[in-house]
Amino acid sequence: MSVKLTEEMLKALPDARGHFGAFGGRFVSETLMDSLMTLEKEYLRLKEDPEFQATFDSDLADYVGRPSPLYFAERLTREAGGAQIWLKREDLNHTGAHKVNNTIGQALLASFLGKKRIIAETGAGQHGVATATVCARLGLECHVFMGAEDVKRQSLNVYRMKLLGATVHAVQSGTKTLKDAMNDAMRDWVANVDDTFYIIGTVAGPHPYPLLVRDFQSVIGREIRKQAMEKVGKLPDALVACVGGGSNAIGMFYPFLADESVELYGVEAGGLGIETGQHAAPLCAGRPGVLHGNRTYLMEDENGQIAGTHSVSAGLDYPGVGPEHAWLKDIGRANYVSVTDDEALDGFRKLTRVEGIMPALETAHAVAYGVKLASTMDKDQMLVINISGRGDKDIHTIAQLDGIEI
Amino acid sequence: MSRIEGVLKALKEQGRKALIPYITAGDPHPDQTVSLMHALVSAGADIIELGVPFSDPMADGPVIQLACERALKHGTSLRQVMAMVKEFRKTDPDTPVVLMGYLNPMEAMGYEAFADAAADAGVDGVLTVDLPPEEADQVAPLFADRHLDPIFLLAPTTTDDRIKAISEHSSGYVYYVSIKGVTGSATIDVDEVAKKVAHVHELTALPVGVGFGIRDAETAAAVGRVSDGVIVGSVLVDTIARHQTDPDALRNALTDLLHPMREALDSLAH
């Protein structure tokens, strides 16, 4: 069932308790409640503050390098043999991914709130790097929590963070991946709540995080609207983005939610295949539950224990997803699909060889699905893939899969 | 009157303080939990907080995280925890049992099924760490219908308005978290806790239990002086971890740990 969304309906979400329909909310231990309520109040005030917005906009322009190009992928389009494929080049942002849009915004919030110590969780390391970067720029103390497993597979980003002056904490608990990094970041936050600002990297977590991260990332979709009108003279027919927690996808989708003609596709990590259980696709194969402060789709066992996930890409290796995506799935506004590790690797190779653009392995999921989808569409239709990050950080993983020592 | 209320009222009349130990169900093995619960009572427990293991215990430090991992390794599920309580109740009809854990296992079971099973097993209260009263509107009536006491946390960061609001949603007792931090992480500042708990007492008529950072008879007595009960968790769970292969030694160690606390608390009686 699909619901026609209006601007008024969208403005009312999330509601005062941070709910998107049945999802979202604020499920945290009492120690954090006051901080979250203060953050919500301050954010809602600053959102309307011209000085805050002007600083945010000028940082995005002069420090991040926005707007990022909307690029027509001519050869990829020809290969797919269907819709025109356009690429939103978030990989060209400073630090190489969309993550920095959000860290700029949240670091600005931290500054306005007078917090000097920053913590963050990271999976692939892109959010960690983006956080360490803004902390270096603003002179803030930075601690990044990263699963020990991810520290191993993303050593380049670990070193980047250290060069930027951040302390990287390798998290040894649980599955040693992104969810455990988030657990430990929350634990640190509880202990240091007075002087610490937690920069969450995705549209998950307790209210108001899904709201403010979505707002900061929505610059992606707003630019696509404008660029599509300028370059093609119409809105795109389809938008494709990868979904781990879902921040690049929501940033791309949000400004189009009320445009019924624009089809939205979120691509989850199918890992070794949904049927194997070895994946990270809660929207495709999970069920609603509560983790990390919000109600959303989760990968869990029948007893409500969070399940281990698998994806070739560390950034998608997460058992939950942003609550707004959970809501968009349930009302039928967005389609959530998955591609396997192998398909994503093919997507990586294809974009690299055909367009000379090396995408992050996370992004490669969107590329793989986007090409497949384009081939089923008409030649006069327009499809945009969000190139959420560049692939330098994954060269090691790719080489290893190819059996090459570098 | 609920079993929790009854016990706390009787203690108050005697001028005594409640000793409330916490263990994680299924740790070190599901077969040992019921006998450990009885051992806690023999060592002086007034109320037992029984932890429901969760894969992602965000508010807990390493000691309780590891306890959860041990329990989950043996497949301890929420349904099994209920069966443990039911078994415990066969020979102990008096000691209140509070389930303490995270929301997701309860959500996976279904709130109504959970409330039914808890009431049937003889559970008295439910403390869900990541469920603030604002999100508890679905479970509240289910608990009320079955006389399960909803127990909520208060923290050093909780504002006065929230202390009042949270108390209104609570019954049995409120649980004051003595430190900003996860379980087992820091040493408490007894004077600071005393001030804060006295303030909480001004805002609510409910008994106040204090937990986090109570590790020996001395801290138990200091906190007992200002509160209605002390909750002892990580130090106990750590003791279980150290004696996990020897059940007899474990029971002795628990007694050695809790007895001095019991005595210290009772020495406060007037």
Image (tube, coloured by chain):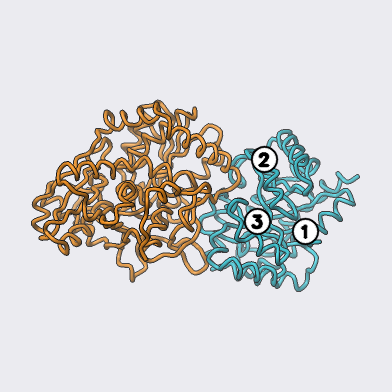
The nearer-to-camera label among 2 and 1 is 2
State yes or no: discs 1 and 3 in contact (Cβ < 8 Å).
Answer: no
Please, what is the three-letter code of the amino acid marked with disc 2? Asp
Residue at the spot of label 3: B127
Q: Which chain is orange?
A: A
Q: Answer yes or no: is residue B109 visible.
A: yes
Residue at the spot of label 1: B4
**Count of picture labels:** 3
C-alpha separation, residue under disc 1 versus residue under disc 3: 13 Å
C-alpha separation, residue under disc 2 versus residue under disc 1: 25 Å
Q: Earlier in the sequence, mark 3 or mark 2?
A: 3
Please, what is the three-letter code of the amino acid marked with disc 3? Leu
Residue A377 drawn at (x, y percent): 16, 62
- Which of the image's four quarters has the C terminus of chain B? top right
The answer to whether residue B257 is left or right of residue A387 is right
State yes or no: discs 2 and 1 in contact (Cβ < 8 Å).
Answer: no
Q: Which chain is cyan?
A: B
Q: Are marks 2 and 1 on the same chain?
A: yes
Residue at the spot of label 2: B161
The answer to whether residue B81 is left or right of residue A74 is right
Q: Answer yes or no: is residue A183 visible.
A: no
